[in-house]
Amino acid sequence: MPTWKATALAHPNIAFIKYWGNRDEALRLPANGSISMNLAGLETRTSVEFQEISTELPGDSLMINRRPVKGARLQRVSAFLDIVRKMAGIETRASVASESNFPSGAGIASSAAAFAALALAATKAAGLDLEEAALSRLARRGSGSACRSIPGGFVEWQMGMGDSDSYAVSIAPLEHWVLADCIAILSSEPKPTGSTEGHALAGTSPLQAARLADAPSRLEICRNAIQQRDFAALADIVELDSNMMHAVMMTSRPPLFYWQEATLTVMQAVRAARAKGLPVCYTIDAGPNVHVITEGAEAERVAGLLRNIPGVREVRLARVGGPARLV
Ligand code: PMV
């Protein structure tokens, strides 16, 4: 086998209807469907190179932001590459180098962009040419939300019946609705409990069953709000869904509290601004940072408002992003 190399780029995504909890942890089959928007401007670029002879490298190697990485993170990437190797019928080790232009592990879905870029680069480097659905299914195995960073624009991950039909599809292209995500960054520290561990706790909350039972209705309301570009309807369902996920997190055993003091300050400021007529709503992932969704024309104004809130260190502005692609 010749030395094969490929580089891919993917954006993180912000979920409007969240994925929290798995039906199958190993296959990362979600307990509910989810809807998200890709984030332009934030990106992870990953190169994968499979070596010529299997004895050349004792194992896979991983560089993240130019630093060698070992331990659990390398193991997770190696386990993912094993799936790709099996698909391609190869056994050689790979060198992986990944760089992101945003902080990882702090509630900006870094693993989504990372595994979406890795899925595309690794399959290409291994000589495979997967279509979008197959690529999305593969990315899902690395990190559930990564399946949503494969298609472009506004995306829905259909929970599916099993491995073969649990993947994400675009429900509207990026030009469909000029939205922006103003990310109020309160902390860039890695979160204490990662989402893989968190998903496993979801079922211990007595609220998870109610959250799941109502998910089809929230998905439908969100899908319609996107299709009709109805910001008021979107704001309502996005905040409800985020609150429901955090209620589950806070009531799992052990409980997970991702918010900081300033998280609530930002949430309240967003609600107050909306009451005054500004099209804004908040949504929070597994971290303290607040994603403030707004219409494109208001993005700068909203970012300015957020910068004045005590505890907000930085505001990153992201518009709607495209699909994962080779570079
Ligand atoms: O893909 P994971 O395992 O990092 O889980 C993502 C979980 C949330 O970001 C909290 C919600 C979501 O749907 O993105």
Image (tube, rainbow, N blue to C red):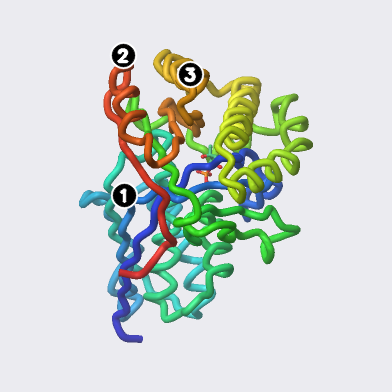
Q: Residues within 10 Å of mark 1 (few under 14, many from 20)?
A: some
Residue labelled with disc 2: 310
Front residue of 180 and 275:
275
Image x and y of residue 160, in percent? 71, 57
Report the amino acid beneath label 3: Lys
**Helix, strand or loop at disc 3?**
loop
Determine if residue 192 is in view: no
Label number found at residue 209: none
Q: Which tag is nearer the camera, tag 3 or tag 2?
A: 3
Q: Is residue 228 above or below residue 237?
A: below
Q: Residue 116's image quarter?
A: bottom left
Residue at the spot 42% in from the left edge and 67% down from the top edge? 120
Residue labelled with disc 3: 276
Report the amino acid beneath label 2: Pro
Residue at the spot 28% in from the left edge and 59% down from the top edge? 97
Image x and y of residue 224, in percent? 66, 47
